[in-house]
Image (cartoon, coloured by chain):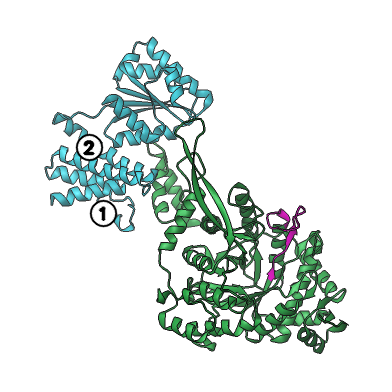
């Protein structure tokens, strides 16, 4: 049985059907005028041979083509793109089945930050001389390492609401290079979680090594197709409207191998996209449709996911303002657009502008997590532990986010309003009114024990100061002390024998 | 056999099951004898009321420990206390015959102008569960009614409850009326409720303040003990 996810019975919709049609038509217009620039020759050739209007613009180091994509190519691609995509997992019970027309949300980590934020606590004594003490968090930012990634995967394996794992932190160890980064980020992650793993590829030359490792883990190429434990993210279109050479080539290769791939675009409203809602939607939708069209021209039926990471620019430093309410608006709109095409949606929420855990962080991440979840994107990423406009990852925040998603999942359960419930509660009301104390407390107990009533906030402190982060750090240590199911010893041996570049220190059987 | 009945009684206090029809914490409990049936069975088999009382007290100690460790919540505590209240109604006359007196008699009331009674009702359940005889006078009760009840039935403690800042002042009025009626020295006055603080209790001349239901039981026990 695959993971259940969270079904949104009545998804929140910001825009009407007519407005969706209007956005769709605007995107088609954009695809013809101005069209896109393309820096990848093979993509230009594919478009050209399938009837798109392709014009060579300039040569030199970065040959450039102008591509105008007609509506019929887009429509054909939307027809052939699968409406259901399976993302497999080492433990098949952790597989995700995403139907484009069903707003069932899976919560996923993200997203390859450079900075890992350590937390420790200093004890301060009240200056007035009293014996009152307070623990205050101190944050230490440092570059992420491969052991950090393994640790994050380990913790996320045990977090109930985490449905799939995207590498949380970019690995920057001294012995990590462009030539071994991909195999190590894959192995460090998949060896510590049995959930689905999605990654962006650093070096296309490493794709075969990564895919071969996945085949070793599941047993064969055929089994990998049945149970794709790995999928990929490609931002092949750089906003505004430019096919990038390397990521476009990566997507072409992934589609040829029939591995699930997110066709993603991340325009920034105000800089690389219009700041107006209609403008960024017309553009991002055109960019994603262009990528989807290419994917289906390469291999009709290749499993793709509609990838949308629209953000608004911060106007003080032009970084991605995930905390801005507009960012949530754009993401809700994109979930609707993907559903309009009946394609599974890779949406984003939960990142904050705040640099460290605290009040601002909680407000920003909850605001977007609640609203975007309600819109029903199937694959909601970035939702755990991210800070500072998606440049910093803090592991204790992931357990806090998990608690918040448990609350949200609880809230989203279907209401139990039916005849059986009516009969039960009327009987209960009449019984209680016949008692002296007239209290319903007794009837709470079975519901409390069976999980039908939420428990108190799990990181509630017993002092006046906020202890949530301190308790979250304790929880991280507790989860790290719980074992995870590593890749078995025989397969691990094969991986280290056959896949070049995997760091020996990641081999748990050598310790 | 003795251990079976007393063991089952202890378990059912912990599970908060009064009768066989009650759900316990586990589904399979429904249909099995509850505390009421087990106390009756024990009495029918000539167990000493004192032995039954000790069993129930042990069970409540376990319930208290589970509450402290956050395994149990208030509904669990109240359910267990309710079973003890029912058991005590059966045991009180027999304990009295054996010369064992109840811990004490407590009157409870929500003061004049205030209709909120959840807190008071919880305190009533917990006090009964701890072996006190409780007379709940009700809510919106005038100072004069409280004074008359005290004069007639001579409880050891009167507990006053108020939820509203606009009615908490009436607690002071109750104490004044008790003084005027000449019964203030006969009874300990304990107050509680959402807006009440220890400082307020001290200011109006109350004898004790219960921060919550469990604290109220602790305060009452310290005053009558």
Looking at the picture, tell me which residue is in the foreground, A257 or B134: A257
Which residue is rendered at x = 42% and y = 53% of the image?
A447
Q: Position of residue A387 (x, y in %)?
A: 62, 57
Where, by quadrant of the figure, is residue A365 drawn? bottom right
Q: Earlier in the sequence, mark 1 or mark 2?
A: 1
- The answer to whether tags 1 and 2 share a subunit is yes
Chain designation of label 1: B
Q: Which mark is residue B32?
A: 1
Which residue is rendered at x = 14% and y = 30% of the image?
B97
Which residue is rendered at x = 54% and y = 88% of the image?
A221
Q: Position of residue B148 (x, y in %)?
A: 36, 16
**Which image quadrant: the C terminus of chain A?**
bottom left
Seen in the picture, residue A130 relative to A364 is either above or below; the reply is above
Residue A439 falls within the magenta-colored stretch: no
Where, by quadrant of the figure, is residue A203 drawn? bottom right
Q: Position of residue A455 (x, y in %)?
A: 45, 50
Determine whether the residue tagged by mark 2 lies in a helix, strand or loop: helix
Looking at the picture, tell me which residue is in the foreground, A501 or A241: A501
Looking at the picture, tell me which residue is in the foreground, A339 or A405: A405
Q: Which residue in the rendered view is the most extreme toward the left?
A: B46
Q: Identify the magenta region.
A: A307-326
> Along the horizontal axis of the image, is A378 left or right of A325?
left
Residue that carries the numbered disc 2 in the rendered image: B90
Colour used to depict chain A in the structure image:
green
Chain designation of label 2: B
Q: Is residue A301 visible?
A: no
For the colour cyan, the matching chain is B
């Amino acid at each position: 049985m695959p993971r259940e996810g969270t079904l949104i019975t009545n998804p929140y919709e910001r825009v009407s059907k007519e407005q969706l049609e209007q956005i769709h038509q605007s995107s088609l217009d954009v695809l013809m005028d101005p069209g896109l620039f393309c820096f990848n020759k093979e993509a230009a050739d594919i478009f050209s041979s399938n009837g798109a209007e392709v014009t060579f613009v300039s040569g030199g180091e970065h040959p450039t083509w102008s591509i105008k994509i007609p509506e019929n190519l887009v429509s054909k691609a939307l027809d052939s793109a699968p409406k259901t995509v399976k993302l497999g997992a080492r433990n098949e019970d952790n597989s995700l089945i995403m139907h484009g027309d069903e707003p069932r949300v899976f919560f996923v980590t993200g997203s390859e930050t450079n900075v890992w934020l350590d937390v420790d606590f200093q004890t301060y004594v009240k200056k007035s001389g009293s014996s009152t003490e307070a623990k205050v968090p101190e944050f230490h930012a440092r570059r992420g390492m491969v052991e950090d990634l393994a640790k994050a995967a380990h913790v996320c394996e045990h977090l109930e609401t985490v449905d799939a794992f995207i590498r949380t932190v970019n690995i920057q160890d001294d012995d990590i290079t462009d030539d071994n980064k991909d195999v190590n980020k894959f192995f460090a992650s998949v060896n510590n979680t049995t959930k689905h793993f999605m990654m962006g590829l650093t070096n296309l030359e490493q794709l075969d090594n990564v895919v071969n490792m996945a085949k070793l883990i599941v047993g064969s190429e055929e089994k990998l197709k049945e149970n794709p434990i790995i999928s990929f993210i490609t931002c092949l279109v750089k906003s505004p409207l430019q096919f990038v050479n390397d990521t476009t080539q990566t997507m072409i290769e992934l589609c040829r191998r029939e591995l699930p791939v997110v066709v993603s675009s991340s325009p920034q409203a105000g800089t690389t996209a219009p700041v107006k809602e209609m403008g960024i939607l017309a553009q991002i939708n055109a960019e994603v449709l262009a990528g989807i069209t290419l994917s289906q021209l390469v291999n009709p039926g290749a499993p793709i996911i509609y990838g949308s990471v629209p953000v608004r620019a911060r106007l003080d430093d032009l970084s991605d303002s995930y905390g801005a309410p507009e960012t949530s608006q754009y993401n809700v709109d994109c979930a609707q657009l993907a559903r309009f095409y009946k394609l599974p949606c890779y949406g984003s929420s939960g990142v904050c502008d705040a640099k460290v855990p605290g009040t601002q962080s909680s407000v920003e991440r909850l605001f977007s997590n609640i609203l975007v979840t309600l819109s029903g994107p199937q694959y909601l990423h970035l939702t755990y532990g991210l800070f500072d406009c998606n440049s910093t990852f803090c592991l204790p925040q992931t357990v806090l986010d998990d608690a918040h998603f448990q609350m949200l999942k609880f809230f989203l359960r279907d209401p139990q309003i039916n005849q059986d419930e009516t009969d039960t509660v009327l009987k209960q009301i009449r019984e209680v009114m016949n008692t002296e104390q007239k209290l319903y407390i007794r009837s709470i107990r079975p519901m409390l024990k069976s999980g039908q009533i939420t428990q108190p906030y799990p990181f509630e402190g017993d002092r006046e100061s906020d202890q949530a982060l301190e308790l979250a750090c304790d929880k991280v240590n507790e989860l790290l002390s719980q074992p995870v199911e590593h890749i078995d010893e025989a397969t691990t041996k094969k991986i280290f024998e056959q896949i070049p570049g995997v760091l020996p220190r990641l081999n748990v059987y050598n310790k | 056999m003795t251990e079976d009945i007393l063991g089952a009684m202890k378990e059912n206090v912990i599970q908060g099951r009064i009768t066989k029809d009650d759900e316990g914490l586990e589904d399979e409990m429904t249909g099995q004898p509850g505390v009421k049936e087990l106390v009756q069975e024990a009495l029918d088999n000539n167990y000493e009321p004192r032995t039954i009382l000790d069993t129930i007290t042990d069970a409540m100690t376990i319930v208290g420990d589970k509450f402290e460790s956050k395994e149990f919540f208030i509904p669990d505590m109240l359910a267990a206390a309710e079973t003890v209240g029912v058991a005590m109604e059966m045991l009180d006359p027999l304990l009295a015959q054996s010369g064992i007196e109840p811990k004490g008699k407590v009157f409870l009331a929500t003061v004049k102008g205030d209709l909120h009674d959840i807190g008071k009702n919880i305190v009533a359940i917990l006090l009964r569960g701890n072996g006190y005889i409780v007379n709940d006078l009700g809510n919106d009760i005038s100072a004069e009614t409280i004074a008359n009840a005290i004069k007639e039935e001579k409880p050891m403690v009167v507990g006053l409850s108020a939820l509203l800042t606009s009615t908490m002042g009436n607690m002071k009025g109750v104490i004044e009326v008790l003084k005027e009626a000449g019964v203030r020295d006969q009874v300990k006055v304990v107050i509680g409720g959402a807006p009440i603080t220890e400082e307020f209790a001290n200011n109006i001349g109350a004898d004790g303040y219960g921060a919550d239901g469990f604290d109220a039981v602790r305060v009452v026990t310290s005053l009558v003990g």
